[in-house]
Image: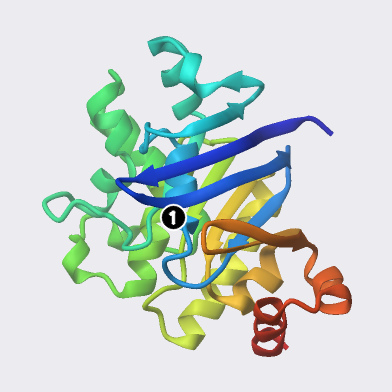
Amino acid sequence: MKNIISVKNLYVQFGNKVVLKDINFDIEKGESIVIIGPSGCGKTVLIKTILGIIKSYKGEIYIWGKNIKNLNEKETKDIKENIGMVFQNSALFDSLSVWENVGFYYLYHTKKSKEEIKKMAIEILKKLGLDEDVIDMMPEQLSGGMKKRVSIARALISNPEIIFYDEPTTGLDPITSQGLTELIKKIHNDFNTTDITVTHDVKLAKMIGKRLILIDNGKIVESGTYEELKEKSNHPLIRSYIEIGG
């Protein structure tokens, strides 16, 4: 299998604080990777750096074999169009309706008509289990679970090859969280995406992760499948997660 993302010798430092230290891993096309660890360990910083949001770092990051530091404007645009991002707080625009949030990129960066974009938004929302009657609602009218689905729809509308999920179940009740976990797994299978999920939710990690990468204090502590870690790891942090995950 071809590596779709490669991170080599990555260091990220803010002032005197080193947040990520010598991070190395590869992600193959079609994998679902879960980056797990306690709050403040550097998980979100890692994905923001891969996405190019954080630009100051040492090391190398390759996406589709291209070093992201060396990309020209067109190459950067092409890569970003093939990546979807689901933010921790959903990050919906309060002044835009559901369909405008879902179709935001096409509304402001393409010449597609509003009618065409609205139709695209309705189609993807239906695939995520939301009825057409939500399309003209505003974010403040949505439940937490609905906001997450709208955020996922916005990430999926461009049919990306890679999707990043940042703490997707944070703030949701157990039933809604379980439903969202099942949805993420279904999206991975139905859309054949490569997924990178950041979470401290062990049940989510167990259900969707083909491979788990555990980070603590900015370093990769261990990696492997849930079952491999459950069987072989004696690391106290791993053992505490395994006990939570069951």
The residue sitting at the front extreme is: 16
Residue placed at 30% from the left, 62% from the top?
133
Residue 124 in sight? no
Residue placed at 37% from the left, 38% from the top?
54
Question: Which of 102/224 is in front?
Answer: 224
- How many other residues sit within 10 Å of disc 1, few (<14), some (14-19) or many (≥20)? some
Colour scheme of the rendered structure: rainbow
Q: Quadrant of residue 49?
A: top left
Residue placed at 61% from the left, 27% from the top?
62
Q: Locate the C terminus by quadrant.
A: bottom right
Q: Measured from the top left, where is residue 243 in percent x and y? A: 70, 89
On the picture, is 185 further left or further right than 38? Answer: right
Q: Give the SS element for disc 1.
A: helix
Q: Measured from the top left, where is residue 240 in percent x and y? A: 66, 85
Q: Measured from the top left, where is residue 219 in percent x and y? A: 59, 56
Q: Measured from the top left, where is residue 107 in percent x and y? A: 25, 31
The residue sitting at the left extreme is: 95
Q: What residue sits right under mark 1 in the picture?
A: 44
Residue placed at 34% from the left, 31% from the top?
116
On the picture, is 231 further left or further right than 42? Answer: right
Give the residue type at disc 1.
Thr
Q: Quadrant of residue 216?
A: bottom right
